[in-house]
Amino acid sequence: MSDFSPGQRWISDGEAELGLGTVLNCDARSVTILFSASQETRTYNTRQAPLTRVMFGSGDRVLSADGWQMLVDDSKESGGLITYIGEDSEGNLRELPEAKLADTMQFDQARDRLLTGQVDRNDWFDLRFRTLHHYQRIEQHSALGFAGPRIDLIPHQLYIADEVAGRHAPRVLLADEVGLGKTIEAGLILHRLLLTGRIERALILVPDSLTHQWLVELLRRFSLNVSLLDEHQSQAHGSANPFESAQLVLASQGWLFANIHRQDQALASRFDLLIVDEAHHLDWSSEGSGPGYQCVEQLAAEIPGLLLLTATPEQMGVESHFARLRLLDAERYHDIERFKDEERHYIAVASAIDALDELPNAVEARSRVEVVADDRDSQALLATLCNQEASSEQQDAARAQLRDALLDRHGTGRVMFRNSRRHVGGFPERRLHLEALEMPSAYRRVVRRLERDEDYLDELLIETGIDHPDVLIYPDATYRELSNDPLNTESWWHIDPRVNWLLEKLSDDSESGFANDKVLIIAHHRETAEGLAEGLRVLGGYHAPVFHEGLSLVERDRAAAAFADEEDGCQVLVCSEIGSEGRNFQFCRHLVMFDMPQHPDQLEQRIGRLDRIGQRHAIELHAPTFTGSPGERLLRWYHEGMDAFSAPHGIGSELFDAFGDALADALLDDEMLDEIIAETRQMFTAKLAERDAGRNRLLELNACRPTRAKQVSDAVRELDEDPALPKFVERALDVFGVDSQEIGNGLLHLQPSQHMLDGLPGLVKGEEGFSATYSRAQALARDDIQRLSWEHPLLREMMERILDGTMGNTALALLRHPAIPSGRLMAELVFRTHCPAPKSLHINRFLPPTAIRVLLDESGANLTSKISFTGLGKNLQKVNKSLARDLIKSRHDQLRDLLTQGEGEAERELPSIVEAAESRMRAQLDSELARLTALAEHNPAVRAEELEALKQERQALSDAIENTRLRLDSVRVVITVDPNA
Ligand SMILES: Nc1ncnc2c1ncn2[C@@H]1O[C@H](COP(=O)(O)OP(=O)(O)OP(=O)(O)O)[C@@H](O)[C@H]1O
């Protein structure tokens, strides 16, 4: 330890960011240092002070407190204080006492740190080099952003996520059938865009009832922390814009759509991506648009990326669906008639795609392809496919390419992704159980009178205030509104046989009973749900939580949680129609439809609560109805008219548009109903055939291209099984002071040690830590364990901290080797490429920080290719810090020369790295651009700005790559010692 004198300049080894310190005073025991730049004063024990004396030598550049720079040539010392002598930038010879050095001088670069004697542990240096290596590999990996999430690798989801996240400012409608994983797709897209730096901020708007579910899914599956914003939270920000308070903001649609002031604030906050769930509620009609549509329309005009999610895009009518497509691309979707015409044309495209499978054998199929394959490339592919002399591999390749080329022409398929169960496959069967009950007299009275007296309907509508046809379909609601009738004094659930039927089923422990199962009950009205729960409690002693739109979010989540709990949970949950939309109840297999919804899409939404990914049983659909009632007639229309209970078909809303009004009029008349059912069936069959032939078929084919989907899942699996990951984790945990212990079954328990470096996600000193696994299957099976991957927040934090900070950028180690005389010095220099570019370019996919290692001996001979990093590392021994410092000091000049020489050696390698990156980038972007340009000729959904953006991106990437510089990342000094000593 050097002696201290007031005025000397020192830096803190552990806290180099404090800047240059000045000795204020000292005595035999303690020394006090002032770090002016950070306005900190520290007192240390003189014998153990973690401080390094700052001394510059010839060739160093220093900064004076007055702002001028000096190239140091010499120095002199007097009374323990140094004065530097050298030239300023104008070439004048000047002197600079150390007290006049700028306080803000930073010593975080490897060179400065080394030459000022700050050395880190050898294992830190080792980890730093490996981090750089893995970071470079992972950043270029095609599965980046998809490997971390805790999800099953489901091909159609990965395909969509890969396709969408690869686009510039993606704007798409995710419209998979209910329960196929749109939230997961949106999460994957978001995760990849964030990890690649393509976006930084996202706003997620979901129905009130789904806020908590989204919050939990994003955290649990994607490790994304989103901030849930509501009015209460917003007010806490006072006059500041609450949307600025987080990177990822989740808000309820109900709140934002009703609040113009908050909408203005959301508009003013610069988001990169907007996600809107259950987008069919954004209603639009030629008479005007609803507040939700208006709000999203404004936001969509400002925010570059847009994901709309809905399972039932046409629920609010075709026009409304078209209006939502317009949110994605206003220019493209402005004329609905033209759009419909285009869609009709796609029948020919779908037929051509089917014909490809019949070629080359069925000659007539060729003409079906020729009708649409009107460009030269497609014609050439068709010729190969039909060429009898081509090999079967050549024909297969031509078929696959042509299929892709034809699919690419489907305009809507580029902006709307719709997977169906039929296409995806592997979903459980649905079984319908009809239960015909006798109508209670109170309900029958009303129905009979309606049947007899034509005028009574109007009277009833006025008296009850209920709309037509609700007044017919929901007899309990009508009964409630007729409470003045002296015959209607009892609660409806007392007289309604559905309640008794339900109670019997609940206690029935036979095969067909519910006694051993959970049951989800959905009723149209909130009041029905509430009354039913009360009835079950009063009449049967069942505690059935209720779930409806009138409850607060917390109450709803509590009800859902009480139902989901496997051990202590409730057997029954009673939901209202819209209260349960989007919810995950696939752990349950019995759905009781207490009444029928009015719209086929609502029916599909109901069944979708259970028929979701993760459902392991056949789905039992129970429908109690009253014989001869309007409700029963409605059910018949669903069942006989359109097979609505067996599988989703996506045609319901068209049928509703065509027959909904007539059906409402036929609810009291069997004859009329029979006719409507027959007509509906006819149209249903025709539409089904049309769907299979045209638009929907293309949509489905477009929504998952199996070859590409497999490539993506293979890439994810490659990262899952990366053998380097566990080794890296072990090293990194050791360096960061996290204890890891194998606890059996392939599980690790990670626990902070006393020396853990602070701020690691999920780990707090003194707390328990967490259990983790590398296995995807294990993590999916158990919610309580985390899954370690290259994308886990802990790994990303450790890697970022190493690469962005100084950790391990200097080291000194001893080498005992019989063949090398002792006292020799080697410098192992690691340079890293630095490519200044905006994050959103995601330059790392072509040129991530890349390490160039240079190993020089003291004579300057380049030993890099002779001694590998690992080979050298194996023979090194650590050394204590003060000895390391002394050794560095004694070899100062030599080291400085080696650093300069190493720079030259590394520079020689730079051009080939830059060239390789440029050609990688060109190969990818040129072909993307060529594909998009060709596509634009056939597919009107390719936005002009997409093409322009891609061109600009290519130029910006090229400029950035060209400007790549090298900088010294880290340096290790190796000194040989006598192996026998
Ligand atoms: N890849 C996956 N791995 C694991 N679970 C999944 C996966 N995909 C979907 N799930 C689960 O399946 C259920 C349905 O998924 P999700 O909520 O994303 O469907 P959705 O299409 O948005 O449904 P809805 O149309 O009802 O809104 C959820 O519980 C989700 O967690």
Image (spheres, rainbow, N blue to C red):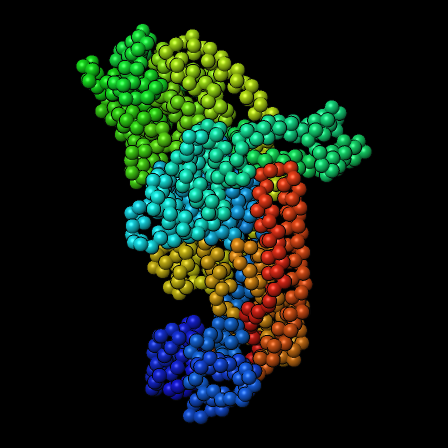
Residue at the spot x=49%, y=28% of the render? Answer: 318
Q: Which of 844 and 234 is in front in this view?
A: 234
Question: Is residue 15 toward the left or the right of residue 332 in the image?
Answer: left
Q: Find residue 800 and report its horizontal and vertical position in percent.
A: 49, 60
Where residue 322 sits in the image (x, y, percent)?
A: 50, 33
- The answer to whether residue 58 of the structure is visible from this angle is no
Along the viewing direction, whichever of 84 and 242 lies nearer the viewer: 242
Tell which residue pokes out farthest to the top in this image.
452
- Which quadrant, please, contains the N terminus? bottom left
Give the quarter of the image for residue 849: bottom right
Q: Residue furthest bottom?
A: 78
Residue at the spot x=39%, y=17% of the render? 664
Q: Is residue 111 above or below residue 335?
A: below
Residue at the location (41% across, 33% down)?
288
Vertical order, 931 against 762 (above or below): above
Q: Which of 129 and 108 is in front in this view?
A: 108
Report the label total: 0
Q: In which quarter of the image is residue 689?
A: top right
Can residue 117 be seen here? The reply is: yes
Up-down relation of residue 253 to residue 79 (above or below): above
Image position, residue 76 (x, y; %): 49, 91
Q: Nearer the viewer, residue 459 or 901?
A: 459
**Figure quadrant of the C terminus:** bottom right
User: Where is residue 253 drawn, in percent x and y?
Assistant: 37, 40
Q: In which quarter of the image is residue 415?
A: top right
- Left or right: residue 283 compared with residue 405: left
Residue at 58 percent across and 79 percent down: it is 895
The answer to whether 262 appears left or right of 349 in the picture is left
Q: Is residue 469 above or below residue 799?
A: above
Residue at the outermost front position:
287
